[in-house]
C-alpha cells in the first residue's frame, strides 16, 4: 500500500481525473464468422459464470452468421440480468452475441486489467442494475454503461494496484480450488445417498405429490419495499431457503399475499432461463416466513401430502438424475422454460421418514463443511473475499483532480 501511496503523491498529488467509459473504450465494432470460432472461443451469456467467476466452455456454438468479435484484453459483460454479475477479461480472440457486451479499450492511458477490476466491482453492477431496462428480464442500458465514470490514474499507479489485487485473487483462487475438490466429494456422496432403485422404496409421480403455481408479476416500482419475496436468484443460488436467505421486498395486497404465498415445505423451481442447464434449478423453503410471496420467474410446488420432509426435497431435487429429467421435459425456443405439467412427469422416491432424516443428517454435515461461511475453509474464503473487496474499493477510489 505504501508504494501506491508514494506513486500517487509523486505522479498525481492533485487528484485523479475520471472519464466516462465512452472516452476510453467502445463496444466492439468488429465481426467474425461463426465458422471461425469453436467451443473454446465462443462466449455466450450462458457460459459466462455468475458472481464474477469468469467463463466456462460453451456447449452451444452457432454454425453460421456473423458474430461480435472480441480480442485479448477486451472486457466481456453479460447484459441480461445484471444482478448475476457476469464478467470476464478475455485472454483470447473469439466471438459472441448481442447478449454479451464487448468493451474494447481505445486509449493507451488505461490497461485492460485495471479496467476489468473497475468494472468487476459491486459498485459498477449496482449502477448497471439501477439503469437496467425491463422488470421481467432486466437488460443493462448500453448508453448508461458508457456513461459510467472510470478513474484514470497514471499507468505506474494502475500497474501497482493490479499487482496487489492479483495477489489477492491468486490467494483466493488457491483456496477455492481446494473447496471445489471438497464439493465434488460432497456431490458424489449426495448422488450415492439419493440414488434409489425401483424396489428400494415406493415411487410417486411429482404431479401426485405437489400442485404447481406460477409466481407474482409486478411493475418495477413495486419492488424494494413491503413484504419478503423469493426471487430467481434466491432459488438459483440456494438449495434451501430460510428467513435470512433472501432480502428482496415487494409491495403487495393482502389478496396477492394469499394467492402467491410461500410456506415451509414449498419447493421452488426457476421457470425460465437462457440455457437448458439453468432451467428448473430448485430450492425448498425450510421455515415459515410471515407474508412471504414468490416471483413470476419461479414456480411454486406446494406439497399435497406429508410423505416428504422439506430438507429431503431440497437435496433430492438438486440431484443430477432430477436435473436430467427437468431438462428432458423442458421446452426450448428462444429460451428454455418449464411448467407444472412438465415437472409433473418427474419420478420421486418415497423412502420412510426415518430414512429421509438419516440421509438429511449426513448431507447436512457435508454441506456444513463445504458451505458454512462461519467456519473452516468457506469461512477463510469469505474472509479473503471481504478483505479483497475492501482493498479493491479502497485502491480504486481516488481524490478527484482539483480544478
Image (cartoon, rainbow, N blue to C red):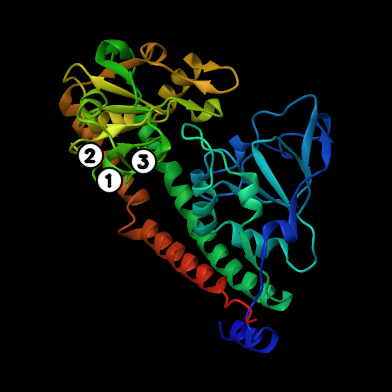
The circle on residue 361 is 2
Sooner in the amino-acid sequence: mark 1 or mark 3: 3
Q: Quadrant of the C terminus?
A: bottom right
Per the image, the residue denoted by label 3 is 223
Q: Residue 357 occupies which quadrant of the picture?
A: top left
The one of 33 and 220 positioned closer to us in this rendering: 220
In this view, 330 is above or below 279: above
48 left or right, relative to 191: right
- Helix, strand or loop at label 2? It is helix
The circle on residue 365 is 1
Tell whether label 3 touches label 2 (CB within 8 Å): no
Q: Residue at x 49, y 53 (%)?
A: 126
Q: CA distance from mark 1 to mark 3?
A: 36 Å
Tell whether label 2 touches label 1 (CB within 8 Å): yes
Q: CA distance from mark 1 to mark 2?
A: 7 Å
Residue 149 position within the rendered picture, expressed as x and y whole percent measured from the top left:
62, 62
Q: Residue 79 occupies which quadrant of the picture?
A: top right
Sooner in the amino-acid sequence: mark 2 or mark 3: 3
Residue 279 position within the rendered picture, expressed as x and y whole percent measured from the top left:
48, 26
The one of 31 and 369 positioned closer to us in this rendering: 31
Q: Residue at x 67, y 28 (%)?
A: 60
Q: Quadrant of the N terminus?
A: bottom right
Q: Residues within 10 Å of mark 2 (few under 14, many from 20)?
A: some
Q: Residues within 10 Å of mark 3 (few under 14, many from 20)?
A: some
Amino acid at each position: 500500500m505504501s508504494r501506491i501511496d508514494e506513486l500517487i503523491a509523486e505522479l498525481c498529488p492533485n487528484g485523479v481525473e475520471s472519464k466516462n467509459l465512452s472516452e476510453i473504450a467502445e463496444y466492439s465494432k468488429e465481426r467474425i464468422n461463426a465458422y471461425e470460432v469453436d467451443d473454446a472461443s465462443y462466449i455466450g451469456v450462458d457460459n459466462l459464470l455468475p458472481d464474477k467467476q469468469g467463463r466456462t466452455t460453451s456447449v452451444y456454438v452457432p454454425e453460421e452468421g456473423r458474430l461480435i468479435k472480441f480480442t485479448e484484453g477486451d472486457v466481456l459483460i453479460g447484459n441480461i440480468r445484471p444482478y448475476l454479475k457476469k464478467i470476464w477479461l478475455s485472454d483470447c480472440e473469439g466471438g459472441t452475441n448481442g447478449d454479451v457486451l464487448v468493451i474494447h479499450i481505445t486509449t493507451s492511458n488505461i490497461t485492460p486489467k485495471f479496467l476489468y477490476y473497475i468494472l468487476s466491482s459491486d459498485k459498477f453492477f449496482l449502477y448497471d442494475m439501477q439503469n437496467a431496462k425491463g422488470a421481467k428480464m432486466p437488460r443493462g442500458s448500453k448508453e448508461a454503461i458508457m456513461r459510467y465514470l472510470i478513474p484514470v490514474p497514471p499507468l505506474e499507479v494502475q500497474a501497482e494496484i493490479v499487482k496487489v489485487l492479483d495477489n489477492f485473487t491468486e490467494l483466493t483462487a488457491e483456496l477455492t480450488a481446494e473447496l471445489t475438490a471438497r464439493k465434488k466429494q460432497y456431490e458424489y456422496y449426495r448422488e450415492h445417498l439419493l440414488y434409489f432403485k425401483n424396489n428400494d422404496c415406493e415411487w410417486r409421480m411429482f404431479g401426485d405429490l405437489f400442485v404447481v403455481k406460477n409466481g407474482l408479476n409486478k411493475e418495477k416500482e413495486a419492488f424494494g419495499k413491503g413484504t419478503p419475496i423469493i426471487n430467481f436468484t434466491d432459488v438459483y443460488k440456494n438449495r434451501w431457503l430460510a428467513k435470512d436467505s433472501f432480502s428482496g421486498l415487494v409491495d403487495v395486497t393482502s389478496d396477492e399475499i394469499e394467492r402467491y404465498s410461500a410456506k415451509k415445505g414449498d419447493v421452488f423451481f426457476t421457470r425460465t432461463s437462457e440455457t437448458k442447464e439453468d432451467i428448473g434449478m430448485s430450492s425448498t423453503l425450510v421455515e415459515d416466513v410471515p407474508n412471504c410471496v414468490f416471483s413470476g420467474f419461479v414456480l411454486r410446488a406446494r406439497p399435497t401430502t406429508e410423505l416428504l420432509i422439506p430438507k429431503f426435497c431440497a437435496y433430492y431435487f438438486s440431484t443430477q438424475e432430477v436435473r436430467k429429467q427437468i431438462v428432458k421435459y423442458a421446452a426450448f425456443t428462444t429460451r428454455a422454460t418449464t411448467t407444472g405439467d412438465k415437472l409433473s412427469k418427474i419420478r420421486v422416491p418415497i423412502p420412510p421418514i426415518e430414512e429421509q432424516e438419516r440421509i438429511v443428517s449426513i448431507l447436512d454435515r457435508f454441506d456444513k463443511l463445504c458451505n458454512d461461511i462461519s467456519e473452516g475453509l468457506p469461512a477463510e474464503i469469505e474472509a479473503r473475499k471481504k478483505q479483497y473487496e475492501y482493498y479493491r474499493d479502497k485502491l480504486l477510489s481516488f481524490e478527484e483532480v482539483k480544478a
